Image (cartoon, coloured by chain):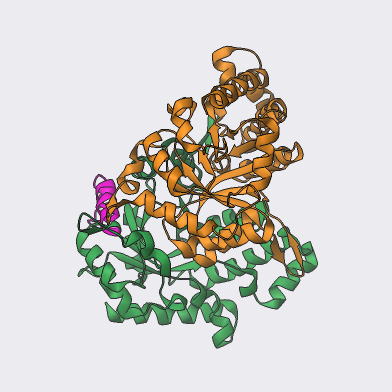
Chain colours: A orange, B green
Amino acid sequence: MIDTLIEKIKEKGNPTVAGLDPKLAYLPEEMKKKAFDQYGETFEGAANAIFEFNKELIDALYDIVPAVKPQSAYYEMYGIEGIKCLKKTIDYAKEKGMYVILDAKRGDIGATSEAYATAYLGNTEIGEKTEPAFDADCLTVNPYLGSDGVLPFVKMCESRNKGIFALVKTSNKSSGELQDLKSGGRYIYEVVADLVKEWGSTTIGMYGYSNVGAVVGATYPEQAEVLRKLMPHTYFLVPGYGAQGGGAKDVVPCFNNDGMGAIVNASRSIMCAYMKNGGSVGEAARQEAIRMRDDITSAI
Amino acid sequence: MIDTLIEKIKEKGNPTVAGLDPKLAYLPEEMKKKAFDQYGETFEGAANAIFEFNKELIDALYDIVPAVKPQSAYYEMYGIEGIKCLKKTIDYAKEKGMYVILDAKRGDIGATSEAYATAYLGNTEIGEKTEPAFDADCLTVNPYLGSDGVLPFVKMCESRNKGIFALVKTSNKSSGELQDLKSGGRYIYEVVADLVKEWGSTTIGMYGYSNVGAVVGATYPEQAEVLRKLMPHTYFLVPGYGAQGGGAKDVVPCFNNDGMGAIVNASRSIMCAYMKNGGSVGEAARQEAIRMRDDITSAI
């Protein structure tokens, strides 16, 4: 499935992904008002406003940005209606030809990881029938439980032509508390990198990259450089550019010399560009997405 | 919130929790048939069958078992309808006076963890109003991202009188790949234990335990003994008893000398007791829950 993502990146000449983390506070007042007038100040009202926001963003970005990354938490907080909106967002982005990376950081013991893999990447069995529940193209997963917690996702990638990104070195300030501990002369994030490499070794695609990617924060460029060498065939999903403080030079170490190997995420800076630069949500997001694309492609 | 759980454990004389991980394969054929006849072989049919199953279990257990632990993955795999069933299950168990530990192992960077904390333990803001989305009593969380990924949950525990259990040493076979690595002479699970202790230090309740608990698998009794000493004021949620292979003697090290400090989970052995011992789902589950209670209380 990584091949599909790489093709979309090449086609658009744009190694970035737009994060859809739609807090209500990010939405224009009139967009909220319209939904609240129709559905009340309810989960349904919030979810409808958020879907309108996402739709405007997707409509403005789909021809220049290869992928979206909805962050599941921001939908789950609006209950069932929020999760309906997540599903609608996944479906709409796919309909528009975008690659959908669902950022849900799932992970559990084997049998339970299998259920999560089924939920987000698979086809659920119901009696004699099967039906996909969320059907994203790709999912982020948490490696803390080790191989038997991740392999059910890898298996699903193989059987359903999907992808995952496992957390290796995250972009937040406290990421080092566990990830930067040293064991036997190696950092924990390096140990996880070795696992990621191994998990992906059976799924190398036509561009030389595996279906098992790694999350590597833009806020730690030195670590990214080491990780890039450790995992030459692993695609990196790179959060932390933009609002979290990472710049174009910080994401450069995440790329290989072939100009491939990483996809950089920005959420707030694209979703909220209209607040800073004026214009409509969609127009401002498109301008910011173009600026980000040019900023990154000129640096790598 | 840990006080509420402890009171329910004392009241029932039963330090166990019934896991609700309802795979369709665990349901009696006639229960599935009834729902499929009414709703078709659809997510709605599956979710209705599962709710009937959960309801029968809760009805049979609520007066003798203090808590239930729905595993979110098994609901998410049935899409929106599955998640509706999760919400109905949480509400029904609370209505029956049970303490609800939602096993969803969430965890992300700060702002996103805040959204997850709001979703499962909090009150979501919608315009001028607020409404709880899932409103469990307690949530399992993953510590791989460090303090800033966990503290939003801790804050929610304080403001909304809720609890969390952070993964420390999980029950699965591969848990040691990361958790048992040694850094500076200490195992990673010990480092996480120190963090858990620190996170909970501001929320010690009337029985001497904090609102921030730890997940410690019954399958690793030696590690549990060390962890029990490291975290005297931390409640342990103990998976791995029963179907995963842990016995009563294996969970003993998870308890303190006061007979408190741990709540032991069993899922499959209770849910599927009817398959092994005959009788109805509810009757068989109740007998197995009594057997498990007596097995554990006589060992500690």
Quadrant for residue A11, please give it. top right
**For this rendering, which residue is in front, A126 or A183?**
A183
Q: How many numbered circles are shown?
A: 0
The residue stretch that appears in magenta: B189-211
- Asked if residue B211 is positioned above or below residue A297 in the image, the reply reads below
Tell whether A234 sits left or right of B222.
right
Check the image and name the residue furthest to the top. A278
**For this rendering, which residue is in front, B168 or A38?**
B168
- Asked if residue B282 is positioned above or below residue A151 in the image, the reply reads below
Q: How far from the left and from the top, in percent, is residue A183?
A: 28, 55
Which residue shows up at 61% across the image and 51% down it? Answer: A163
Tell whether A224 sits left or right of B300.
right
Q: Is residue A214 magenta?
A: no
**For this rendering, which residue is in front, A117 or A300?**
A300
Q: How far from the left and from the top, in percent, is residue B155?
A: 35, 40
Tell whether A152 sits left or right of B243.
right
